[in-house]
């Protein structure tokens, strides 16, 4: 017989009540062994037994697996889990200093909490020592500002001036670090850009230019043809760097990051540079919900992980848009989700390049909801798809139509890449299906509309030629009948080929009988 569980301490705590509820659920399910529950839940028997042990709050995933294995109500238990997690969190003392910066960039005074970028800082310091101009580039949200402020500046000696794009560059030997250089390429900044380029090309101070990846080449051109700037790429952290960035700041605050939390956080952020701000935000909220000195997976999940805060930021941006901007946002996010495949990246040629569309994209990028690199736009994290209720509702609408739209988008992009090759146009049943879908109100980009119009025009040209040939054939018959002097026609009449019909425009008596003729029986 299975070994009996240890009795729970009658302390009346929320944790004990939660464990007792799980035990009661198992008892109502017939008291299956934990080995049997493990087979049903796909978690180990030890993990499931610990969930009802009352020593710590299990993760949400383990809780729901336990509940489903006992035929319980998963929705009810998820609400119960979140309420218990909220009750178990310990508010941070007012005087305590948080070890994470959340969505804010790390600054010079935060250098003691800036971990995981030592290798990249070394590379940047070496580039600055060897070159008069260095371009630091990477996707939005990759941590360029934190790298410069908390990584580079504390490692440099001498005068350093940190500024933003458009401000006048100081003269002298100071190193000038310019953040967010992409702002120089905004509409109406031509004079600022020209003045900035002139300062770089006339032998001004040494500079480090931080710029988003999609503007890196244009920013490098500001230095002029005489000098090629060094380039330092800010990419995703490795798994080891992420572990250091998570655990080292907590250790400075005399806290411990539990292994399940560390494993989960690294898995969510690895390979996704745009997820770093949300990782820092989630860790800050987890620290605020810590259990004593421990940062737990339960606290991380109670904070919403990455998806919950990102969804809140997305909804705030959407609410601030007017009706035209909201229509653009709806189309944009529907494009960022592949039917049945989760989040995807879209290239620039899949999007409208109107000022309205560009402004909507920029708002979501600045809110760190979307990430833009040199060529593509993508969600900061795929958990946004399930965490943002508005987006989930959009994605539930017309799944088949979204697949049709996706196919049209891909075909139009291929057509443009191949210089509008006519052989790549839609035809036949495929074109008919797309046209039927497009009869309803749809948002098509200029490129998609041009491709669909070209396909439609190409499809109708053969029909017009067929109608013209039939019309010419009829004219030929009438002309031949007129040549008979109006006499009744009783029998076959020679019908010239369509390309010889102009000959019949001559007087009937002069019209030669063609050698290559078809017989038309008029009855």
Image (tube, grey):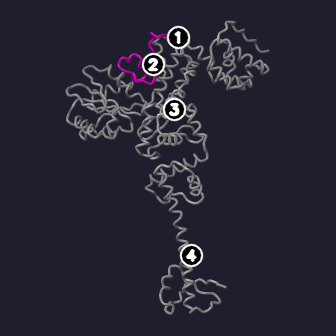
Nearer to us of marks 1 and 4 is: 4
Whether the residues at callouts 2 and 1 have beta carbons within 8 Å, the answer is no
Q: Is residue 99 magenta?
A: yes
Q: Gap in Å between the C-alphas at discs 2 and 1?
A: 15 Å
Nearer to us of marks 1 and 3 is: 3
Say few, some or many: other residues with alpha carbon within 10 Å of mark 2 (under 14 / 14 to 19 / 20 or more). many
Q: Position of residue 71 (x, y in %)?
A: 74, 25
User: Which one is in front, 418 or 318?
Assistant: 318
Q: Which residue is mark 1?
A: 293
Secondary structure found at label 2: loop
Q: Quadrant of residue 302?
A: top right
Q: Position of residue 212 (x, y in %)?
A: 38, 35
Magenta segment:
92-118
* Mark before the other along the chain sequence, 1 or 3: 1
Say few, some or many: other residues with alpha carbon within 10 Å of mark 1 (under 14 / 14 to 19 / 20 or more). some
Say few, some or many: other residues with alpha carbon within 10 Å of mark 4 (under 14 / 14 to 19 / 20 or more). few
* Mark before the other along the chain sequence, 1 or 4: 1
* Mark before the other along the chain sequence, 2 or 1: 2
Q: Gap in Å between the C-alphas at discs 4 and 2?
A: 78 Å
Q: Gap in Å between the C-alphas at discs 3 and 2?
A: 24 Å
- Which secondary structure class fits the magenta region best? loop
Q: Is residue 334 above or below residue 492?
A: above
Residue 470 tag number = 4
* Mark before the other along the chain sequence, 3 or 2: 2
Q: Which residue is mark 3?
A: 315
Nearer to us of marks 3 and 2 is: 3
Q: Is residue 430 left or right of residue 247?
A: right
Say few, some or many: other residues with alpha carbon within 10 Å of mark 3 (under 14 / 14 to 19 / 20 or more). some
Q: Which residue is mark 2?
A: 100
Secondary structure found at label 4: helix
Q: Gap in Å between the C-alphas at discs 3 and 4?
A: 60 Å
């Amino acid at each position: 017989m299975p070994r009996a569980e240890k009795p729970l301490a009658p302390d009346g705590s929320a944790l004990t009540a939660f464990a007792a509820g799980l035990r009661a659920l198992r008892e109502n399910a017939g008291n299956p062994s934990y080995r049997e529950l493990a087979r049903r839940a796909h978690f180990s028997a030890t993990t499931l037994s610990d969930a009802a042990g009352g020593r710590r709050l299990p993760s949400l995933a383990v809780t729901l697996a336990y509940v489903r294995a006992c035929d319980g109500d998963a929705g009810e238990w998820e609400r119960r889990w979140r309420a218990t997690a909220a009750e178990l969190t310990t508010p941070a003392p007012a005087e305590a200093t948080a070890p994470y910066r959340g969505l804010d960039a790390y600054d010079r005074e935060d250098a003691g909490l800036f971990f995981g970028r030592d290798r990249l800082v070394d590379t940047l310091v070496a580039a600055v020592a060897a070159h008069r101009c260095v371009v630091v580039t990477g996707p939005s949200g990759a941590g360029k500002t934190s790298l410069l402020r908390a990584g580079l500046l504390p490692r440099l000696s001498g005068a350093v001036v940190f500024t933003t794009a458009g401000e006048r560059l100081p003269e002298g030997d100071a190193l000038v670090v310019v953040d967010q250089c992409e702002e120089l390429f905004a509409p109406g900044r031509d004079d600022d850009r020209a003045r900035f380029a002139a300062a770089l090309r006339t032998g001004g101070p040494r500079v480090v230019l931080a710029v988003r990846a999609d503007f890196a080449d244009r920013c490098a051109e500001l230095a002029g043809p005489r000098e090629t700037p060094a380039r330092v790429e800010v990419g995703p952290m490795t798994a080891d760097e992420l572990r250091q960035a998570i655990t080292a700041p907590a250790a400075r605050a005399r806290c411990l990051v539990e292994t399940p939390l560390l494993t989960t956080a690294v898995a969510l952020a690895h390979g996704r540079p745009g997820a770093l701000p949300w990782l820092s935000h989630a860790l800050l909220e987890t620290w605020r919900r810590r259990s004593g000195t421990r940062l737990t997976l339960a606290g991380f999940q109670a904070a919403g992980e990455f998806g919950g805060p990102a969804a809140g930021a997305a909804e705030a941006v959407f609410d601030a848009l007017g009706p035209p901007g909201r229509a653009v946002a709806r189309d944009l996010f529907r494009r960022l989700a592949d039917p049945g495949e989760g989040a995807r990246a879209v290239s620039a040629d899949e999007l409208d390049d109107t000022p309205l569309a560009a402004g909507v994209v920029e708002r979501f990028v600045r809110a760190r909801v979307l990430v833009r690199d040199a060529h593509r736009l993508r969600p900061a994290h795929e958990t946004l798809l399930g965490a943002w209720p508005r987006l989930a509702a959009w994605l539930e609408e017309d799944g088949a139509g979204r697949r049709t739209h996706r196919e049209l988008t891909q075909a139009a992009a291929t057509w443009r890449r191949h210089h509008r090759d006519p052989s790549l146009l839609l035809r036949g049943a495929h074109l008919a299906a797309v046209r039927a879908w497009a009869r309803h109100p749809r948002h098509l980009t200029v490129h998609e509309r041009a491709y669909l119009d070209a396909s439609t025009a190409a499809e109708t040209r053969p029909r017009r030629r067929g109608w013209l040939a039939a019309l010419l054939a009829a004219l030929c018959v009438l002309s031949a009948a007129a040549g008979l002097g109006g006499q009744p026609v009783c029998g076959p009449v020679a019908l010239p080929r369509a390309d010889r019909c102009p000959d019949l425009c001559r007087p009937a008596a002069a019209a030669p009988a063609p050698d290559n003729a078809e017989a038309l029986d008029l009855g």
